[in-house]
Amino acid sequence: MKIKSVELEHVCGITSRLPETDLIQVAFCGRSNVGKSSLINGLINRKHLARVSASPGKTQTINYYNVNGQIHFVDLPGYGFANVPLKVKEEWGKMIDRYLRTSSLLKKLFILVDIRHEPGELDKMMYKWAEVYGLDTVVIATKSDKIKRSQVQKHLKMQRTGLGLKEGIPVIPYSSLTKEGREDIIAIIEDQLNNL
């Protein structure tokens, strides 16, 4: 998949209606500090389109990136560490839930976890949400460059076991530094386009 054009097309806040669109979607979700913006920037070969922040919780909206006029990359709000009031966190949860429940064009949900750590309760909840809604899910284990090469498989197994993943759900190690895993993720997205 050659990235020819990328445009931030829709931004939806807590009270916004989700846009009506005819493009298929792949969505990205994960904890506030898991490297979601870095992953999206790495996939689309842009440095600063998805905003990377030193303060977790920067993405407080659902952002739709139109890629090549063919597909939307949907960036969901990060959950977990964001330094915001509990009421706002609850609203974010409702917003993510509404998106997952009602987006008929969502073809793949990428759940990002930090490869170094056991999945947290919010990661497990996110996967359970995906299961309840019958979403086609891929787990991306970010920050793979932060552990030794010899430890990668052990940590991938830790993610699989910790999340209680069903057989056949891929867990892909990814590094925004080395771009490890980028081609595997792009191949999964290409499959969605090829199956239209």
Image (tube, rainbow, N blue to C red):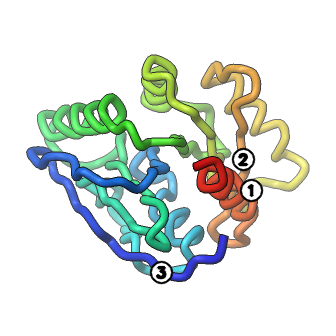
Residue 162 visible from this viewpoint: yes
Q: Residue furthest left?
A: 15
Disc on the earlier residue, 3 or 2: 3
- Mark 3 highlights which residue? 5
- Mark 1 highlights which residue? 184
Taking the image as shown, residue 64 lies to the left or right of residue 125, namely left
| Residue 148 location, quadrant | bottom right
Identify the element where label 2 is drawn: strand
* In this rendering, the label closer to the viewer, 1 or 2: 1
Q: Residues within 10 Å of mark 1 (few under 14, many from 20)?
A: few
Q: Quadrant of the N terminus?
A: bottom right
Circles 1 and 2: CB atoms closer than 8 Å: yes
Q: Residue at x 32, y 49 (%)?
A: 77
Q: Residue at x 62, y 40 (%)?
A: 139
Q: Residues within 10 Å of mark 2 (few under 14, many from 20)?
A: some
Residue 143 visible from this viewpoint: no
Q: CA distance from mark 3 to mark 2?
A: 25 Å
- Mark 2 highlights which residue? 172
| Residue 90 location, quadrant | top left
